[in-house]
Amino acid sequence: MAKIDAVFRQHPDLNPNLEGKQGVTFLLWAYSHHHVKSLQALVAHKANVNQPLHLPNNSGGVDTTHLLNIATEGPKDELLLALLELGADPNSRDERKMPALHNAIYINNYTRMKMLLDHGADINATDSAGGTITATLASLNNFEMVYYLLERGADWRTNNNEVAVSTQEKSVGNAEATQWQIKVKQWLLAHGVKFPVPSSGAKRYAAIRERWEQTPEGRAWREKLDALGAQPEVVGKPWVQQEDQAVAAMKAWMQQQGIPEPPFFMPSPGGK
């Protein structure tokens, strides 16, 4: 530590953010050696903890990322914490335009996810595909973390209502996980979500289903599904089985009426 201080005293014009070979900076070198005190000393000498890193990739090009994103997927929680406490931006993005929060959940490190949130990460940040961590975790059946994020203020309405759809449809096959799924449904009900929500793939059949549900059979199925979906503890398989039976009944009606299957991709207005 004393030698770091001495170098900067002896070389007052030394750029603390200098990029060396292959884009390595002083901060990246200290991080790579898992040395928190060196990180602190370098920042004290004006090293920029948010400076983009330009690192070579396997294709012969250069990726632009940030030290925080590397630390989020790195070997030690304390390195990430040190960077956050030194002022690293918790919303920094890596070369894939992935926010640090997403880096954390993709390695199943929820301690780091919470650490980032505690230091100001945007809970509703989206990746390059527009996905939030709440929607992603719901799609991965991790309803315990979904519940945690909802309690912290995550917006469940993003990603085409993916959180509610996953909560309604996913069959997790684990009693404890299912209890968290039920807790999420009850949370959503308490916050104004009306179950059942439109199921996966419902958009394709929306116009046909609206016609079918005006028939006595379709109306009876709609009432049955509405009653089932409104039950706070009905999630996953019980719901999906009933919905599948309703769809089968609708398709039988379509066949009787000579109604063809709708196209997978609906034309946009103007035929484009």
Image (cartoon, rainbow, N blue to C red):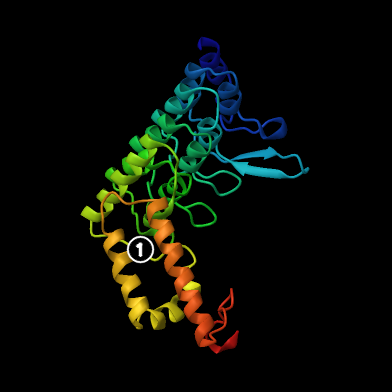
Q: Does 217 appear above or below 74?
A: below
Instruction: Name the quadrant of the C terminus.
Output: bottom right
For this orientation, the residue located farthest to the bottom is 270
Quarter of the image holding residue 195? bottom left
Q: Does 139 appear above or below 51?
A: below
Q: Mark 1 highlights which residue?
A: 197
Quarter of the image holding residue 255? bottom right
Q: Is residue 55 visible?
A: yes
Q: Does 59 appear above or below 111?
A: below
Residue at 40% across, 48% down: 134
Residue at 51% across, 84% down: 256
Q: Is residue 29 left or right of residue 101?
A: right
Residue at 33% across, 49% down: 154
> Residue 70's x, y, as percent?
56, 33
Q: Is residue 13 visible?
A: no
> Residue 264's x, y, as percent?
59, 73
How many discs appear? 1
SS at mark 1? Answer: loop
Please state which of residues 89 and 198 is positioned toward the viewer in this rendering: 198
For this orientation, the residue located farthest to the top is 2
Mark 1 burial class by Cα count in 10 Å: few <14, some 14-19, many 20+: some
For this orientation, the residue located farthest to the right is 60
> Residue 156's x, y, as percent?
34, 54
> Residue 232's x, y, as percent?
26, 52
Amino acid, disc 1? Val
Q: Does 230 appear above or below 5?
A: below
Please state which of residues 265 and 222 is positioned toward the viewer in this rendering: 222
Q: Is residue 21 left or right of residue 85?
A: right
